[in-house]
Image: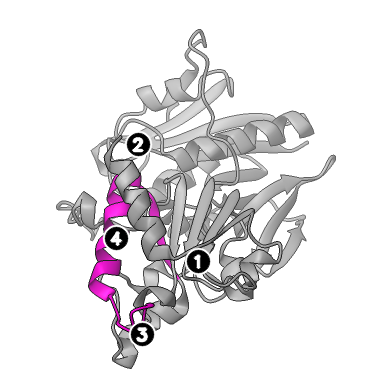
Amino acid sequence: MESILVLTHSDESGSALTKASLETVTAGRELAARLGAELTIGIVAKHATHAAKQVADVAPKVLAVQGEAFAQARFGSDAAACTELVRAAQPSIVLAPGSSRFARAMAAVAHRTGGVADTHITALGGAESVEATRWFYRQRIEAVVSRDRRPWFLLLDAGTHAPFATTEDAAPPDEIAIAVELPELRTKVTGFRAPKTDAQTIRPDAKLLFVAGAGWTKKQPDGQVHTEEAGAIILKFLAASGASLGSSKSLVDQGGEGNSVLPFLTHLNQIGQTGSTPRHAKGLATCCHGEEPHVVGWRFIGERRAVSLDANCGWTRGKADVVYIADAFQVMARLNEMLATK
């Protein structure tokens, strides 16, 4: 019989679990119920008490590694903590969020415990055995993977499951502290340097993905390029809506070609065949033709809408739920006015 360990970690507060961790808890709970397997929760945090309450009623046993050394993401401490949690639980299946914190350490944990790891898991199936679904080749090929080797480490992509929410009357779980002998730590976290909120354009947890295409920097009906106006409209919308910003490859590449470009865009904003495939509840594309490269990037968007002047563009052929045949400059300017009145 399989036994399952769900590894989780805290957010910047050091005590509350991340959204991706709570999503992994949901996946672990569903898999354990389907297989009739024993479920254990493992927590890595500065203070694990509050985190343990967040997963009450999920598993009868919670293993926790806590302390100042585990407040921040660091390979040495995270790998040591997860290794001890796995050794204490002795699971056959280990689920973990595919966060940057755990992604950098989990391969080492699998090696130290004699297991094997797979990343970018989007679904877990199988009635009598575990079958993991993941995408290959920039999310263009979907595969179902199964393995006999144990322990099997599975890192789940964010946004594939609903975050777990405990009930108010849930009894606190039994929290077992696991001691970890840390190696010599050569990395010291001295603080954070992050862009201001209004300068941050990539927001993975945003409900809306706003995608800008090359049309924003092309000549408009008056025969002129209005890049500065385009940038102001887009930034104003992002600030008012809290949306995450995506971009087509053609728009991002314009800076290297000496053309007019939106200064706040980087290749990190790029989505599509050669970019990322974000997961958001809704998406709005503007000045994008919507052909296959962009559709690949929109594969996991729930509700798709687009603004285009071309009634025969790719979005009108079943790739968007709603298409507005209009000028993106006018539509977004009017939308900003409506948001400003709220």
Identify the amino acid type marked 2: Ala
Name above or below for residue 311 compared with residue 58.
Answer: below
Q: Which residue is mark 4?
A: 233
Nearest-to-viewer mark from 1 and 3:
3
| Viewer-closest of 292 and 328 | 328
Which of pointers 4 and 1 lies earlier in the amino acid sequence?
A: 4
| Viewer-closest of 160 and 48 | 160
Rendered residue at 71%/52% (across/down): 132
Identify the amino acid type marked 4: Ile
| Viewer-closest of 147 and 224 | 224
Q: Residue 272 appears at what percent x and percent y?
A: 54, 70
Q: Residue 16 appears at what percent x and percent y?
A: 36, 31
Pointers 2 and 3 in contact (C-beta within 8 Å): no
Residue 267: quarter of image = bottom left
Q: Secondary structure at mark 1?
A: loop
Tell me how far mark 3 sits from mark 4, CA to CA.
19 Å
Q: Which residue is mark 2?
A: 45
The reply to whether residue 178 is in sight is: no
Q: Which residue is mark 1?
A: 276
Residue 254: numbered disc: 3
Q: Is residue 265 magenta?
A: no
Tell me how far mark 4 sits from mark 2, CA to CA.
41 Å
